[in-house]
Amino acid sequence: MSSRRINLWVNIDWSIIGLYLALVFLGWVNIYSVEYNEETSGVFDLSHRYGKQLIWIILALVLAFIFIIIDSNFFVYFAYPLYLFIMVLLIAVLFLGKEIHGAKSWFAIGGFQFQPSEFAKLITGLALARFLSSTSINLKNFRHIFKSFSILILPAILISLQPDTGSSLVYASLVIVLFREGLPGIYVIIGLSMAVLFILTLIFNKLYIVIGLISLAFLFYFLLQARKKTVFIGLAIFVVSGVVFKIFNELFSLDLSNSLIILITLLVTGIAYSILSYVHKLKYVLAIYLFVAGAITFTYSVDYVFHNILEEHQQKRINVVLGVESDPLGSGYNVNQSKIAIGSGGFWGKGFLRGTQTKFNFVPEQSTDFIFCTVGEEWGFVGGVVLISLFMLLLFRILYIAERQRTKFNRIYGYSVFSILFFHFVINIGMTIGLVPVIGIPLPFISYGGSSLWAFTILIFIFLKMDASRTESL
């Protein structure tokens, strides 16, 4: 064996491999528990999911070995071709794919099913790393920001057309990578503000949201503007204009809604105040006005997106989580049963193979999206803490390793690995305990599924290969 091969196995991070194997083992044990019955013939029984999962695990270990011995330069040179190839597959699956649970996400070849969206995440991470590691890229340049987001948005759009909303939302987590590489914080603030505004719009009347946004804008302007008198002039223009339009609406029976009157008032105030700001050279006026106008436009678009783009079951799940409606026997059934199962486990759990919620199939998708409820029921609070701790150790170790990389490409890909795993981990467990809407994404290494296990395995072992080879020059 060559010295280079010996160095590879010496330099590889065995702590991550240990955590990976522990999580995969725990995943299989819980899948076995979900599927187990007294007539079970053996762990390789392919008529049960635990038998199939064991085959997927063995093949995943083979894939792990293959990707460990591949030259690191391969991932750099072929990042763009692989990205193009996976985009073609995402388009093809829309026409040739097999529909399962209302989504055309799988290619079916004989008895084998392949889900390209699972592999699109890691390949997108490679493509993003290739783009951002170019010497000329600066994420303070809007053109470069646009190209970076385009790399993320294209697969997200194609996956949402399947439709698979959960998998498409994973790409939002890669903003963490962009932020680490220099994306101005204002973009992150805008993104978080949009998320908060989306939630508030679903809970409260849009008129109250609009009034709140305008009030907030005047408050910010008052704090920033040195000439306080101009703020009161703007407020006076807004109030007077609003009163005039309201009277005008009543006199001529135009039947304009209060929201529309406020929007017209805001437009008139904006024009008048823009002229005033130009004459007196006032600062911040245009920026704050554009922010308010954009926020209000977004507020009114939420209603369209929510009712025309999201599926009805997705709307109900979001409303149940937000407390807008209660549907314990419908959209809220899975989450309610999951919380019952987790709560019934108590501190130590009911014990292996003794989960009553599991055995009587009260929780749908127990071996996939809701696998964590099996952990909570059979292993209790302690088991849940152990599983979460293993994930946290894995995520922190990935961050540590990402920061010690000697090439920008490796570091960026490492952060992509962290972002994808972190999103899946937080959202999946959040779904099972009712903190986030059910969007149908697996818990890495734990949930049943060959495509997801293989994709997460390749995702990690590509990074391990990069880290083991970090002393070599590209």
Image (cartoon, rainbow, N blue to C red):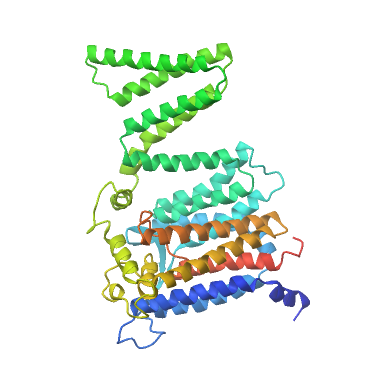
Tell me where residue 381 appears, x and y as whole percent: 40, 69
Q: Which residue lies furthest to the front in this view?
A: 347
Nearest the eye: 407 or 151: 407
Name the residue: 38% across, 72% down. Answer: 347
Tell me where residue 139 appears, x and y as whole percent: 63, 42
Name the residue: 36% across, 60% down. Answer: 433
Residue 40 visible here = yes
Name the residue: 45% across, 53% down. Answer: 168
207 on left or right of 87: left
Nearest the eye: 369 or 337: 337
Name the residue: 52% across, 17% down. Answer: 228
340 on left or right of 403: left
* Tally of numbered tags: 0
Nearest the eye: 287 or 231: 231
Tell me where residue 362 appears, x and y as whole percent: 26, 69
Q: In which quarter of the image is residue 412?
A: bottom right
Nearest the eye: 359 or 229: 229
Q: Is residue 471 above or below residue 26?
A: above
Q: In which quarter of the image is residue 431?
A: bottom left
Residue 367 visible here = no
Q: In this view, does 321 lie above or below 34?
A: above
Tell me where residue 114 appears, x and y as whole percent: 44, 66
Q: Is residue 255 above or below residue 463?
A: above
